Image: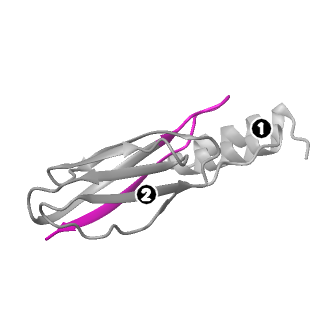
Amino acid sequence: MQVSEQTLGRAISRSRRRSGCIRATIACAVALTAVLGCTPRPALEFSPATLPDAQVGSTYAATITVSQAATPVGGATVSGGALPEGLELALAGEPDNTIQISGTPTAAGTFTFTVYVWCYGTNVSGQTATQQYTLTVG
């Protein structure tokens, strides 16, 4: 599909007159897809959706796998809430696109936190995503 610069300009101009950033973003994405012949990257997916429970004083290990990444996951952090005391989150070396939560929890409770991941970019920005988890320590 060929789209001229004039058509692209009209799509962007019209999108600016509409209310809301989302419409402008969608219009630009559609226009750029047509011009460049590329498709938007899919949303990252986290698996599992829930984490297994932990026990105070017992070694804990859980693995989160990130799929739909167009490029490798470059980092992972807790961006909201907090892990239970004694646990750490780290990007695993192998296999690719996995995150490890490990350690020995020192206090009981229910802990809600958000995992943020980013992927390496190529000629464009890499993908990013968040996933909220709740971990119960008994």
Is residue 18 rendered to the left or right of residue 76?
Answer: right
Q: Secondary structure at mark 1?
A: helix
Total number of numbered discs in the rendering: 2
Residue found 12% across the figure and 63% down from its top: 56
Residue at mark 2? 64
Residue found 68% across the figure and 45% down from its top: 29
Residue 46 location in percent, x, y?
48, 59
Residue bounds of the magenta highlight? 118-138
Extreme residue toward the right, this view: 2
Residue found 17% across the figure and 55% down from its top: 84
**Residue 52 colored in magenta in the image:** no
Q: Which mark is residue 8?
A: 1
Residue 136 location in percent, x, y?
20, 68
Q: Residues within 10 Å of mark 1 (few under 14, many from 20)?
A: some
111 is higher (above) or lower (below) than 29:
below
Figure quadrant of residue 6 = top right
Q: Are marks 1 and 2 in contact (CB under 8 Å)?
A: no
Residue found 31% across the figure and 70% down from its top: 52
**Residue 135 colored in magenta in the image:** yes
Q: Which is nearer the eye, 134 or 97?
A: 97
Residue 69 location in percent, x, y?
60, 49
Decide which of tag 1 and tag 2 comes sooner along the chain. 1
Q: Nearer the viewer, mark 1 or mark 2?
A: 2
Q: CA distance from mark 1 to mark 2?
A: 40 Å
Is residue 72 rendered to the left or right of residue 47?
Answer: right
22 is higher (above) or lower (below) than 5:
below
What type is the residue that disc 2 sits on? Ile
Q: Which is nearer the eye, 99 or 67?
A: 99
Residue 23 location in percent, x, y?
58, 51
Q: Which mark is residue 65?
A: none
What type is the residue that disc 1 sits on? Leu
Q: Residues within 10 Å of mark 2 (few under 14, many from 20)?
A: some
